[in-house]
Amino acid sequence: MLRFETAGESHGECLVATLTGLPAGVPVSLDSINHELWRRQQGYGRGGRMKIETDTAELVAGVRHSRTIGSPVAIIIRNKDWQNWTQALPVEDTEGSEDSKKPVTRPRPGHADLAGCLKYNFHDARYILERASARETAARVAVGALAKALLNEFKIHVLSHVIGVGSVRLERPVPWDEIVALSRKQEVLLGCVDPEVEQQMKAVVDEAYRTGDTVGGIFEVVARNVPPGLGSHIAWDTRLDGRLAQAIVSMQAVKGVEIGRAEEGAMSFGSKVQDTIHYQREERRFTRGANRAGGLEGGITNGQDVIVRGFLKPISTLRRPLESVDLETREASLAAYERSDVAVIPAAGVIGEAMAAIVLAEAFLEKFGGDSLAETQRNFAGYVEQLKNF
Ligand SMILES: Cc1cc2nc3c(=O)[nH]c(=O)nc-3n(C[C@H](O)[C@H](O)[C@H](O)COP(=O)(O)O)c2cc1C
């Protein structure tokens, strides 16, 4: 079973991630992990921190001579900002260390600050926000790069693009080639494949900058070449649509998820939104009239592209602070301000890719198993043969 964990605080020494369950023999390169980390840091609308941090991963376990060896893979990503926080967030309580804390006693609406303080019995939201912060997603992206490394061996590719920023929406269908071209760009604006719509998106972010506001948006993750048969209809927690939805909604600031064209379907008559079934005799394979289901029927992949969208709320931290209450005095006071992003939709797309890749890799290994890549490949080849002769 593939499972991952992350640890680390936003201004702590480092982020740590482990991934257990990858077969031995999967090629892993630090460059490709670092490239994914770089992609997570791009996009118009990011705050000052992205300028301080250029994330790089250290692979400290589970990979030897550029291949997995079957044991847990462990990754460290150091926080470059740690040097400014050693006094405020020391691991050990030393004399005088109380004075140099950077406490947050005015919880910020839209964050875990207040709920977390009530739950963990802190009067300083620093201890909550350090972990609730989306800085943690750097670790998820590093793990996602490992999941992608496995999937790539089976020609399965997972990418994303932005289809909405504020009220601006890309309305046209987007071919896979355009998403691939977008992923190769060296400069990322808002991650939209259409330059004209992207400029409209930029105008929305500019307005937010001007007015001290923030914006949310919608990203779409597409997985190509996913074989039919991942996930299962047999139980609620084996359904892959539900597992993907959880993975995407677990991301900071994601408040909604859409599989395929769910919203359009909900507003249409049933006759208008089905993916009809056809058969190509020469190639001996089933084809579909459309892919509104986003590659999933009954919680099982059906061989079409898997398509999942994430809906991001606008970033909650505003330059004009919101009303809050001081945890010590209980007096009305303005919420604390932490350096903040204005828009993060392209970055969220990259994190969404990572989460989708992890879920797909897990489902893939559930179906095909294997302690070594060669064994997984043999099992997969047998299934491909079964599909051919179906
Ligand atoms: C890539 C990324 C970067 C983010 N950066 C910020 C930020 O700079 N400031 C902020 O207030 N929220 C930011 N957020 C959102 C918060 O982390 C998130 O809203 C908060 O943790 C509360 O969680 P919830 O919105 O899921 O309830 C970011 C989210 C993502 C995905």
Image (cartoon, rainbow, N blue to C red):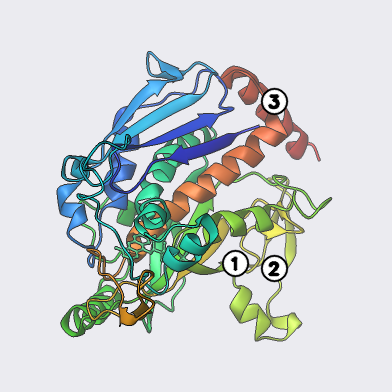
**Can residue 130 be seen in this snapshot?**
yes
Asked if 335 appears above or below 174 in the picture, the reply is below
| C-alpha distance separating marks 3 and 2 | 29 Å
Horizontal and vertical percent position of residue 182: 31, 57
- Which numbered mark, 1 or 2, is in the foreground of this view? 1
Mark number for residue 379?
Answer: 3
- Side of 237 where 109 appears, left or right: left
Name which residue lies at 75% across and 81% down: 270
Residue at the farthest right position: 234
Query: How dense is the environment of label 2, judged by Cα within 10 Å: few (below 14), some, or many (20 and up)?
Result: some
Horizontal and vertical percent position of residue 338: 25, 64
- Which numbered mark, 3 or 2, is in the foreground of this view? 3
- Side of 21 where 169 appears, left or right: left
Reading the image, the residue beneath label 1 is 260
Instruction: Give whichever of 326, 338 is nearer the camera.
Output: 326
**Amino acid at circle 3:** Asn
> Which quadrant holds residue 360?
top right
Name which residue lies at 75% across and 51% down: 237
Name which residue lies at 55% across and 18% down: 70
Q: Is mark 1 within 8 Å of ligand 1?
A: no
Secondary structure under tag 1 reads loop
Name which residue lies at 17% across and 59% down: 48
Mark number for residue 275?
Answer: 2
Query: How dense is the environment of label 1, judged by Cα within 10 Å: few (below 14), some, or many (20 and up)?
Result: many
- Side of 319 where 215 appears, left or right: right
Query: Where in the image, quadrant-wise, is ligand 1 located?
Result: bottom left
Secondary structure under tag 2 reads loop
User: Of callouts 3 and 2, which one flags the residue occurring earlier in the amino acid sequence?
Assistant: 2
**Amino acid at circle 2:** Asp
User: Of callouts 1 and 2, which one flags the residue occurring earlier in the amino acid sequence?
Assistant: 1
